[in-house]
Image: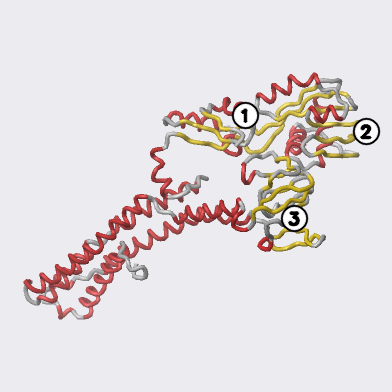
Amino acid sequence: AFKHRSANMYTLVATGISAAWLYSTTALLFPGLFPEERLRDVFFDVTAVVTALVVLGMALEIRARAKTSEALKKLIGMQAKTARVVRGGEEIDIPIDAVVVGDVIVVRPGEKIPVDGRVVSGASAVDESMVTGEPIPTEKTEGDTVIGSTINKTGSFRFEATRVGKDTMLSQIIQMVRDAQGSKAPIQRTVDKVAGYFVPAVMIVAVLTFMTWYTFGPSPALLYAVITTVTVLVIACPCALGLATPTSLMVGIGKGAENGILIKSGDALETAHRITTVVLDKTGTVTMGKPSLTDVIALGSVDEDTLLVLAASAEKVSEHPLGEAIVAGAKDRGLTLSEPETFLATPGHGIEGTVNGRMVVLGNLKYMSEKGVAAGAAESILERLADEGKTAMVIGVDGGLGGVIAVADTIKADSVAAIRRMHELGLEVAMLTGDNVRTARAIGTKVGIDRILAEV
């Protein structure tokens, strides 16, 4: 307050504590200065309690801020440290801070994309879950945009940097979190405004009290003037006004963080009682956030277990989450998988390989057509599964139609009950997702969502 030349609650707290301590010390060391026994009382307990309250309030605030700081540290930890840049016809690794707009950057499978940019050559599937929350990687080809700190999964590509440093999407998210930590709620701004008038007013009253008792008070006038002035300062010490607001807000934000709720600011917390609509992210909130095997439908001469063994064995060396879900599903059913003799993945379309001497093709209808597999009999099943919010793939065995395998991001066990409870509180529940409308509608219908915002 002294540095900024503005009075606040801590000005009055410091003045009251100092006055009480000086008076108490004087009464303890020089009791003869006080004509009456009752005037020799000390106020060390007052200074200790008020100081403890102030420190406690600060400690609670620091602890609550630490909860959101952990989220900030996790965001900062997501950033890539280096980038492989093409300069002078050679690929060189440089610190992320040295990347400039226009640089062409090479990204290999499993690496983090260092900055935001646009693909200029190559193709791959990119895990953008840290931004979108969607567990299934997004296929990227020439001309598509990529986001810094997302993870390249399957292929290798080159992209041109379009946003670097503080302009990247992740850097802007980090800055938003920092701004939120330093924001003040409207009630805090009101308290600060009141303090700007209250503190000078108390000081003026204290001075007037001293002058009145010094001029008109009994002898010794100076002593009585000091005692009454100290009394005014101690009584006016604004413990509740100065500490209750920031403490309650910070404890509220901290409790939210403990339960996995990151509250943007004190302003957001204060206005929460006026909420009429709750918007939920689909992936990881309503659903598990990870695809799992849901359906295996045989349409040819191969039975379901054999079909799943062939598909899972072919996907065994794949890094795609859908393939990993098929492999995990086969293992959960106790099936024994084989190592594929050959394997070829076509990003965005499907895979083909040889398992136990049998040719296996797994992918979408277009991919089946390209590989000469007649999959017309599977179209109605694919439509039905898509309406249920599942990602379905056709499997071909030895050039013929084998069947359909589907995976989906399954609904959490407590989602329906949680949404029902929100409805009981009179809240409208909306679901936000980057997934397609059909999948979003299927999930929303099952859990009782009122409004669906898809493909965002």
Q: Earlier in the sequence, mark 1 or mark 3?
A: 3
**CA gap, disc 2 to disc 3?**
43 Å
User: Which residue is located at x 41 percent, y 41 percent?
Assistant: 272
Mark 1 or mark 2, whichever is nearer to me: 1
Q: CA distance from mark 1 to mark 2?
A: 40 Å
Amino acid identity at mark 2: Gly
Residue 357's mark? 2
Q: Secondary structure at mark 1?
A: helix
As shown in the figure, which amino acid type bears the numbered disc 1? Val
- Which residue bears the numbered disc 3? 104
Foreground of the two, 293 or 370:
370
Give me the residue at 62% from left, 29% from top.
437
| Whole-percent x, y for residue 106 in the image | 77, 54
* Dot 1 alpha-carbon crowd within 10 angstroms: few under 14, some 14 to 19, many 20 or more: some
Residue placed most toward the observer, 89 or 335: 89
Whether residue 414 sits left or right of residue 404 in the image: it is left
Residue in view at x 52 percent, y 56 percent: 69
